[in-house]
Image (cartoon, helix red, strand yellow):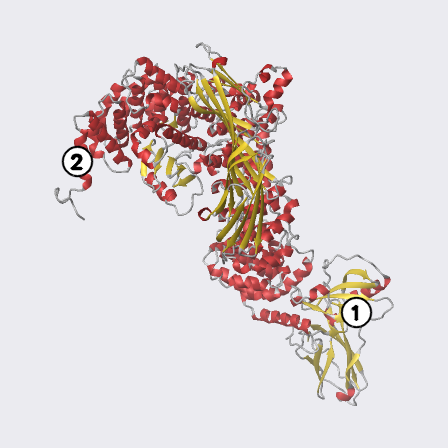
């Protein structure tokens, strides 16, 4: 298991060092600094073995988190733990920065003592941790409160405490998708996928039992066959604005927050759970079929002699004309030896950013089924460099108010048997946001 | 160095800080003390030694402030070991805390005590631990479970003696899932150091309990349980299937470690399921999406996932064969993700997706990162080897890349082209010229070695192979061992292919390798070649130029038994390093290695059968002793079509030359030079000789020799050359005291016996003598070549004459070659039969016949007494009494390897 955990600043000065196992000596702290942080070459692997000691590291802005071990540990678990550690720190004191870590080092030691015992990760849900790691001491707790804490920390529903009350029961669902594309210069889709998340903000009293439904192809097909159509009809959470009228989508794979009963999903494909209080990520999913690509980029790059480059890029929006895409940004890479750029664009603003080696073209809003164009002349300095310019792909950023995967939320039902509110009393909201992930067209 | 004036010399600022902290720790105000402890911990974190404050910090332990208590405990854990006596002071406080009504404090005490590795403290720990293991609060029990593992690490015997292992085992049946999970984790770790004990006692009841807890515990607990489950061997396929059914839902967990551990369990238990069952196939299908999903996680998890997918793809390629697109590299992937993706792309490349893959690889080859570009270039080569249909496209892509002249791209491309040659011999050699153009830019050992190998292997097709290799020889001692070894082998190959003009080169390299080098491998290989060439050149040829096994498709497959072991370690560090745990974990040699379960019941178990099949296809790419010795590198067969026996002759010829290398025999050297001379001369001076059935000629007319007339001819009977002469006395007196002597001549012909004329030759009398000849005499080149000067003495005077020895008497009986250079279409005619029959009497052997444009062609071989081979093409036009003899046109090339030891004759019949 994890033998020790160190946090360094960008200079390699150690900010936090906690050793869990006897086989990890103080010299491990220096070994990592010398061999990884101060290494001359760029880091080639997130796992480094130095003198039979393995170091796992992740970086958050300029903070290094390193877990150390001499055993054959579960590597995926160590990384997941390091991510969790970052989440927990962020939940307690905001951004993971050198200053915040220095100001909260006592808290961090307390957290590390709690969530990692002898190198074994323990309950690390912030909801539970915040009930007893408070930096205020736990003097005033009654015996009842104490046992409530311990049963929550160790219990089956470690993510939610009892006795939550709201005057108005309300929930918000965000379907956040990032659409990824790699397109050839000829417009052939080399790879495309949507990775989506359903984020829920729940403000519900008691211990509500929830059931979430979406237009999952498997569920709809099953329902169609079995004649169970009532659920499909009662789609009380419509909205959105997908351009396609398709009824269901094929989900390649999905993962769920630990509150979701996985065995039930496996057997019935129904998503049921008792939600944590407040904001959390209910599920992640991935689709690759029938993706609506909101934009198409058509590049044209022409080398005029050795010192000039002509670039023309056309973008076309491909969704309902009534919808508006926002924050559109097209990034056209330029060679390192660019000396000057002249740009003409029909819409928005375009600028050559020498420090980023790119022409950045920004358009605030663009409706569906429109087209816009930019053309640029790039002057190049003559170089002796034999190596060809690698021509990085043209990338794009945008935000659209629909789910490019076609996913729709059909329902989210809430049952709380002990308290007297019913599903109909809960105010429910849903919104869809499609963003560009890595949306690239080669040129 | 300056010291603060107030404190005088010897008082460093550090001691001032300690001094100040000491005062603060003993402050009356609680808040002050807390702040002081914080400062102590901060100093401890950055590595300052604050152990001298031990008693003062321990004094702060008696507090009801939990935060302060935790800080003090943190300090204790760090320094107790260095101050064991003082640590005892804390024991009372711990024992008291273990009785505290607050479960959080009880747990904290037992948790901290386990971290203090001082014997005296652990003695006091036993009683509180026993109570805590049975505590009413699950939080305390789950902490106590881990504490048993801690105690075991300090004093294993004590844990056994105190019966803690049994208590721990009882906790597997605990009602709280987290307690179960921690107990499982602790037991798993303890059992690793007791390989033979059945500590975990995984029976179906316990498994059931674990599977129930699996649904309820935290994500970390699920990992502990899944990792433990993977060590269980189900008794039959039904049990395996029912466990799999309960594990598969975990594949949808958001935590990638849970997913990977579930994959591990499923991959292991798949071995037990019958391959034809529906469930087996359903399970395979279920494995693919979660593995793909792992690639949308954070880069570090992607890396771990990719390393594991690399194993899974080797074990069960069917799982991900449709998913190659997800392994396409994204522009801003971290480099370690890019490199791993590339590896998997190659493994998944097949005829179906090769076009896409190649297009991608071409893109990658223009990226910036040198390692990545190299790997992409290598990948193109691997694709060519793996998917035959794509080989041509791959080769042309590689050629395009070579044209870019980017140094490391060129070098990498040459290395992979060598492998392509080994896989597809005689297919792409036309590009050798392009490769040779880049010779000068190669500065890496790999690339140099690859180029040298290519030149050596295809020496017969590269005009200036000897010059190219010689250029490498100049800096021989500065080259890496790899290059030296390859160069040695390449030159020996070259020599065996073109012996005569490369002798110096081979001598040079052999002496560099054996005399001037300190590298034992190089010396040994040098000596082996030397002996081989000098004792048995035929075998040398068979060995060095032997047909080599084709390169295997998958070069860096993990060896099957290791692969199976690594599959048992999916998700762990071993799977990231692709090494078994004992390779990087200290003191783990006693740990038994993990194996995949073996299917029960069936006589041919599916599990091990697959690895055996695989084993045959895996050929270690490097380091094969024999392969390395001969520098075969499992390459392609040598490109020598069936001309071996003829070449053997050539080698035979030079056997002497090689002897001279070793034994320095003078005579041999001379003999060798002679041959050399001949070869060259015969090529440049186009000699015409007559192969005729000679009638006796008058060599010495009577008028010139005071009445003695000698006529004669040469013949060959039963393998012996004779000079058949007729001596006629045309003088008036009798002649006696005959003797004969030959001048030095081209073939070293001398009489074996004295002239057998023992009686006086009376006037008008004739005598016929047959003088047996051999060719062991001194050699001098004559013009014409077959000229023989003879001196005959009698009682009257000494007379001189010369005659031309017809070459046919030198034609030895074993001049028939096994087969000839070409395969001809046979077309026989009566004419040819007669001619060849007649010629065969003269030891000119017809190897093949063909008919070209109405002319019959005979291909002939013959061998001279001194070992010279003659190849000839005899053209017979029907009705034309003149037969033209030519040497084969392809051998006319000045760079042909045969030029030096073959004579070509233009003979008119």
Relative horizontal placement of residue B337, taking residue B148 as reference (left or right): right
- Measure the C-alpha gap from mark 2 to mark 1: 115 Å
Q: Nearer the viewer, mark 2 or mark 1?
A: 2
Q: Nearer the viewer, residue A403 or B488?
A: A403
Chain where mark 2 sits:
B
Residue nearest the viewer, comparing B740 with A17: A17
- Vertical placement of residue A361 versus B220, above or below: below
Which residue, given by chain and number where applicable, does mark 1 sit on? B884
Q: Position of residue B144 (x, y in %)?
A: 34, 21
Task: Left or right? Give the position of B329 relative to B51.
Answer: right
Q: Residue B652 in the image: x percent, y percent? A: 64, 63
- Rendered location of residue B7, percent (x, y): 13, 42
Instruction: Say whether residue B564 is visible.
Output: no
* Farthest-out residue, bottom: B732
Quarter of the view holding residue B319: top right
Residue bearing mark 2: B19
């Amino acid at each position: 298991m994890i033998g020790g955990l160190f946090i360094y600043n960008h200079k390699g000065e150690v900010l936090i060092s906690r050793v869990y196992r006897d086989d990890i000596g103080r010299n491990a702290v220096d070994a990592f600094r010398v061999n990884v942080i101060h290494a001359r070459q760029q880091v080639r692997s997130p796992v480094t073995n130095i003198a039979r000691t393995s170091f796992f590291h992740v970086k958050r802005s300029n903070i290094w988190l390193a877990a150390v071990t001499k055993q054959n540990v579960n590597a995926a678990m160590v990384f997941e733990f390091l991510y969790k550690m970052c989440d927990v720190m962020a939940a307690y004191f905001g951004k993971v920065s050198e200053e915040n870590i220095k100001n909260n080092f006592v808290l961090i030691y307390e957290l590390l003592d709690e969530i990692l015992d002898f190198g074994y990760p323990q309950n690390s849900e912030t909801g539970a941790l915040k009930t007893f790691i408070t930096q205020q001491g736990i003097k005033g707790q009654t015996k009842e409160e104490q046992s409530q804490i311990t049963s929550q920390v160790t219990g089956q529903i470690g993510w939610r405490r009892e006795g939550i009350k709201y005057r108005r029961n309300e929930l918000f669902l965000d379907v956040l998708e990032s659409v990824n594309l790699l397109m050839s210069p000829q417009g052939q889709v080399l790879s495309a996928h949507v990775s989506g998340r359903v984020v829920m903000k729940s403000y519900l009293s008691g211990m509500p039992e929830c059931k979430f439904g979406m237009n999952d192809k498997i569920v709809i097909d099953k329902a169609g066959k079995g004649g169970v159509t009532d659920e499909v009809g009662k789609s009380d959470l419509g909205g959105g604005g997908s351009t396609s009228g398709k009824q269901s989508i094929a989900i390649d794979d999905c993962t769920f927050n630990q509150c979701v009963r996985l065995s039930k999903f496996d057997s019935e494909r129904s998503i049921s759970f008792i939600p944590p209080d407040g904001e959390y990520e209910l599920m992640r999913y991935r689709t690759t079929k029938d993706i609506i690509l909101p934009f198409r980029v058509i590049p044209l790059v022409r080398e005029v002699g050795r010192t000039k480059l002509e670039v023309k890029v056309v973008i076309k929006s491909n969704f309902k004309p009534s919808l508006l895409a926002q924050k559109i940004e097209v990034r056209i890479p330029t060679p390192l030896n660019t000396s000057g750029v002249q740009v003409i664009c029909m819409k928005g603003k375009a600028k050559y950013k020498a420090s980023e080696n790119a022409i950045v073209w920004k358009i605030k809003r663009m409706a569906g089924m429109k087209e816009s164009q930019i053309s640029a002349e790039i002057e190049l300095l003559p170089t002796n460099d034999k190596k060809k310019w690698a021509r990085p792909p043209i990338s794009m950023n945008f935000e659209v108010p629909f789910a490019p995967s076609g996913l729709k939320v059909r329902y989210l039902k809430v049952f709380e048997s002990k308290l007297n509110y019913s599903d109909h009393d809960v105010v429910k909201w849903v919104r869809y946001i499609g963003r560009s992930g890595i949306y690239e067209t080669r040129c | 160095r300056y010291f603060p004036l107030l404190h005088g010399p010897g008082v460093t600022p550090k001691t001032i800080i300690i001094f100040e902290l000491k005062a603060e720790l003993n402050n009356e105000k609680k808040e002050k003390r807390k702040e002081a402890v914080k400062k102590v911990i901060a100093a401890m974190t950055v590595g300052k030694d604050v152990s001298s404050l031990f008693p003062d910090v321990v004094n702060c332990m008696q507090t009801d402030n939990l935060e302060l208590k935790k800080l003090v405990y943190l300090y204790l854990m760090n320094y107790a070991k260095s101050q064991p006596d003082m640590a005892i002071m804390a024991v009372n406080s711990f024992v008291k805390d273990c009785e505290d009504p607050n479960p959080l404090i009880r747990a904290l005490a037992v948790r901290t005590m386990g971290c203090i590795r001082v014997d005296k403290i652990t003695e006091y720990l036993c009683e509180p631990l026993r109570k805590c293991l049975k505590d009413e609060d699950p939080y305390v029990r789950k902490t106590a479970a881990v504490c048993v593992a801690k105690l075991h690490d300090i004093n294993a015997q004590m844990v056994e003696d105190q019966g803690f292992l049994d208590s721990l085992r009882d906790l597997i049946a605990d009602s709280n899932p987290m307690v179960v999970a921690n107990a499982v984790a602790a037991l798993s770790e303890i059992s690793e150091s007791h390989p033979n004990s059945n500590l975990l006692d995984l029976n179906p009841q316990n498994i059931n309990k674990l599977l129930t807890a699996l649904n309820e515990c935290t994500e970390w607990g699920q990992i502990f349980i899944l990792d433990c489950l993977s060590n269980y061997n189900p008794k039959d396929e039904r049990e395996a299937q029912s466990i799999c059914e309960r594990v598969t839902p975990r594949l949808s967990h958001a935590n990638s470690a849970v997913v990977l551990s579930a994959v591990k369990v499923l991959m292991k238990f798949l071995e037990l399921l019958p391959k034809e069952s529906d469930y087996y196939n359903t399970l395979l299908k279920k494995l693919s999406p979660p593995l793909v999903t792992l690639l949308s996680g954070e880069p570090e998890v992607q890396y771990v996932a990719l390393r594991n997918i690399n194993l899974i793809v080797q074990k069960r390629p069917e799982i991900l064969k449709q998913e190659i697109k997800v392994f396409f590299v994204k522009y801003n992937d971290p480099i370690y993700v890019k490199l791993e993706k590339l590896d998997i792309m190659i493994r998944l490349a097949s005829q179906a997706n090769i076009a896409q893959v190649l297009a991608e690889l071409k893109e990658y080859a223009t990226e910036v990162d040198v390692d990545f570009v190299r790997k992409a270039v290598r990948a193109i080569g691997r694709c060519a080897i793996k998917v035959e249909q794509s080989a041509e496209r791959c080769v042309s892509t590689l050629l395009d890349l070579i044209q870019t002249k980017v140094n490391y791209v060129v070098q990498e491309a040459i290395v992979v082209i060598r492998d392509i040659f080994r896989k597809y011999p005689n297919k792409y050699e036309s590009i050798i010229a392009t490769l040779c153009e880049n010779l000068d830019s190669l500065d890496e050992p790999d690339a140099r070695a690859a180029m040298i190998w290519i030149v050596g292997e295809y020496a017969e097709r590269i005009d200036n192979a000897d010059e190219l290799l010689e250029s490498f020889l100049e800096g021989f001692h500065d080259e890496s061992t790899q290059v030296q070894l390859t160069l040695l082998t390449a030159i020996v190959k070259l020599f065996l292919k073109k012996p005569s003009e490369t002798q110096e080169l081979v001598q040079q390299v052999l002496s560099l390798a054996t005399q001037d080098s300190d590298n034992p491998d190089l010396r040994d290989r040098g000596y082996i070649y030397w002996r081989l060439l000098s004792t048995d050149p035929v075998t040398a040829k068979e060995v060095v130029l032997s047909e080599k096994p084709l390169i295997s498709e998958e070069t860096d497959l993990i060896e099957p038994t290791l692969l199976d072991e690594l599959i048992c370690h999916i998700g762990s560090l071993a799977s990231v390093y692709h090494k078994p745990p004992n390779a990087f974990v200290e003191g783990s040699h006693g740990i038994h290695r993990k194996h995949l379960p073996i299917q029960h019941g069936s006589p041919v178990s599916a599990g091990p059968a697959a690895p055996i099949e695989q084993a045959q296809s895996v050929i270690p790419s490097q380091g094969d002793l024999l392969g390395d010795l001969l520098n075969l590198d499992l390459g392609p067969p040598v490109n020598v079509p069936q001309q071996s026996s003829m070449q053997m002759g050539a080698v035979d010829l030079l056997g002497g030359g090689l002897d001279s290398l070793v034994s320095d025999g003078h005579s041999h050297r001379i003999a060798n030079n002679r041959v050399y001379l001949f070869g060259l001369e015969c090529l440049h001076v186009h000699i015409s000789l007559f192969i005729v059935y000679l009638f006796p000629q008058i060599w010495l007319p009577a008028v010139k020799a005071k009445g003695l007339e000698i006529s004669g001819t040469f013949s060959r009977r039963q393998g012996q050359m004779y000079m058949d002469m007729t001596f006629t006395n045309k003088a008036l007196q009798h002649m006696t005291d005959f003797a004969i002597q030959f001048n030095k001549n081209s073939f070293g012909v001398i009489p074996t016996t004295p002239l057998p004329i023992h009686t006086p030759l009376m006037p008008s009398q004739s005598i016929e003598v047959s003088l047996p000849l051999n060719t062991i005499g001194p050699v001098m080149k004559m013009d014409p070549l077959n000229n023989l000067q003879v001196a005959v003495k009698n009682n009257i005077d000494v007379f001189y004459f010369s005659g031309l020895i017809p070459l046919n008497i030198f034609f030895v009986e074993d001049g028939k070659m096994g087969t000839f250079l070409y395969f001809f279409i046979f077309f026989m005619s009566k004419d040819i039969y007669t001619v060849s029959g007649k010629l065969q009497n003269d030891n000119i052997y017809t190897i093949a016949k063909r008919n070209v444009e109405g002319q019959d062609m005979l291909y002939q071989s013959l061998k001279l007494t001194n070992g010279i081979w003659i190849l000839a093409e005899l053209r017979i036009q029907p009705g034309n009494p003149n037969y033209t003899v030519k040497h084969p046109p392809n051998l006319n090339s000045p760079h042909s390897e045969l030029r030096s030891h073959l004579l070509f004759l233009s003979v008119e019949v």
